[in-house]
Amino acid sequence: MIVMAAAVYLFGECGCLWCRLFFCGLAPGIWILISARMIQGISSALLLPQVYSSIRINIADTKRAQVFSVLGMVLGLAAVAGQVLGGWLIHLNIYSLSWRIIFLINIPVGVLAISFAKQIPESIASEKLTLDIHGVILFSVGLSLLLLAVMEGASLHGSAWIMISIATGITLLSLFVIHQKHLRLAGKDPLIDFSLFRDNRIITGMVLVFLIYSTSASFFLSYSLFVQTGLGVDAFLSGMIFAPTSIAFIMGSLIAPRLVSRWGTGAMAVMALLYLFGFSWLGSQIYFRGEQFQANELIPALVITGLAQGMSMTPLLNMILNFVSHQNAGMASGMLSTLQQIGAAVGVAVISIIWSGEENDRINTVLQRNHYAERFVNAMVYELLTMLLVILLLLWLRRRQNRGMAEK
């Protein structure tokens, strides 16, 4: 996740699939697996922003919301495949491959993706851009140091290494900002054109992406820890319980564009409120039931959460990309993808702090369930506070848009 967050923006403007999946699946040790996952992150960084920028450039404004709804549906289907099929494949333990099969099964999927990619119209910038190597190094190292400090902060709390990492990361990113501004003044091609941030709508949209994706990644982790470790449910059954959530996500993605086109940003605020309600339902269920809770009782609240998640995420990306020009579509797409990964990393880091120390809870089953239930409730409090901030930002954005329309 850290490597992808650092690399995803850098390659977003530029546009070994089999190798990364093959080495992940057949890695003989942890360090080779980590190295292969780093390659996987870089490869994903090459691909992910191209999806957003291609939609922004090749699809007409009137049809773009519909296309993003289909994209949301595809993401929901991918979530179903990841949770259900992944758990099922591990459960079957084909050829005693255990977890390795979840990487190897993606090789034929990658072949199909490459064949479909050939059907996408090519879009080339009118002017040839140069890659800022110095900016790449400053951004990659600075962001990686900050994310490492955030994600390892729970286990290395108070250590000098964490403080040094944070200070160095902030310094390098500050130098990156100065360097980018100098490039722009010199008439060269910066990695980030900070003139984009003169539009407060873009800044607000980027913050919203960061916040919402932090709730998504952290929620998935909390669900897995609570259901599989706390309640003792196996991976396959856990995926089956989660499957209705992904189906609801698909439905929300398809419904959201119509609501937003009719009621605008206000509809997105209502969707975020429904998202908040889903987290409240989940947290209150566990809080009042404790160790007596059964995993299948999560399904109704999970469906509401998945529906609201699909309704919140899908129109957000379309809204932000509508704020930028065609020339800046690749840059904006890279920034969006980066913030998705940074948000996910920060969300996981926060949840890791909340869940830290669970290995000492296994004194007996009842005590373990109680402790996991308590941590799950605490995790939902984080989700609630984050979504409350999202709602406030959406209401501010709606007010600003209404003011702009009144002035016109």
Image (spheres, helix red, strand yellow):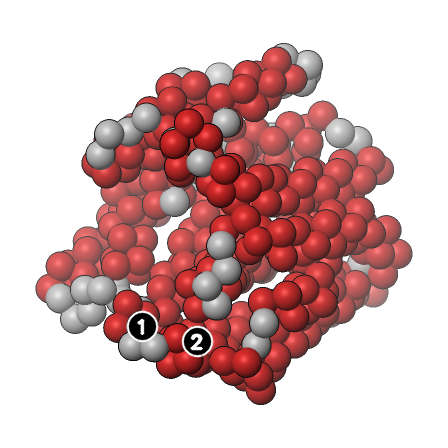
Pointer 2: what residue?
369
Relative horizontal placement of residue 89, taking residue 148 as reference (left or right) = right
- In which image quadrant can residue 80 be found? top right
Callout 1 amino acid:
Arg
- In which image quadrant can residue 68 be found? top right
Tag of residue 2:
none
Where does residue 39 sit, x and y in percent of width and height? 34, 29
Relative horizontal placement of residue 69, taking residue 341 as reference (left or right) = right
Along the line of sight, the residue nearer the viewer: 2 or 94 = 94
Q: What separation in Å lies between label 2 and label 1 (alpha carbons)?
A: 9 Å
Q: Identify the residue at image location x=50%, y=27%.
A: 105
| Among numbered discs 2 and 1, the one appearing first in the sequence | 1
Callout 2 amino acid:
Arg
Where does residue 95 sit, x and y in percent of width and height? 42, 27
> Quick one: quadrant of the N terminus?
top left
> Quick one: quadrant of the C terminus?
bottom right
Answer above or below: position of 406 versus 242. below
Circle 1 — which element?
Answer: loop
Pointer 1: what residue?
362
Answer above or below: position of 333 versus 21. below
Furthest-bottom residue in this view = 288
Q: Identify the residue at image location x=50%, y=37%.
A: 92
Where does residue 266 sit, x and y in percent of width and height? 78, 66
Along the line of sight, the residue nearer the viewer: 63 or 131 = 63
Answer above or below: position of 407 versus 102. below
Answer above or below: position of 13 versus 281. above
Instruction: Count neighbours of disc 2 (C-alpha within 10 A) and say few if under 14, some if 14 to 19, many if 20 or more.
Output: many
Q: Is residue 101 visible?
A: yes
Q: Is residue 308 visible?
A: no
Along the line of sight, the residue nearer the viewer: 77 or 135 = 77
Q: Identify the residue at image location x=36%, y=69%.
A: 355
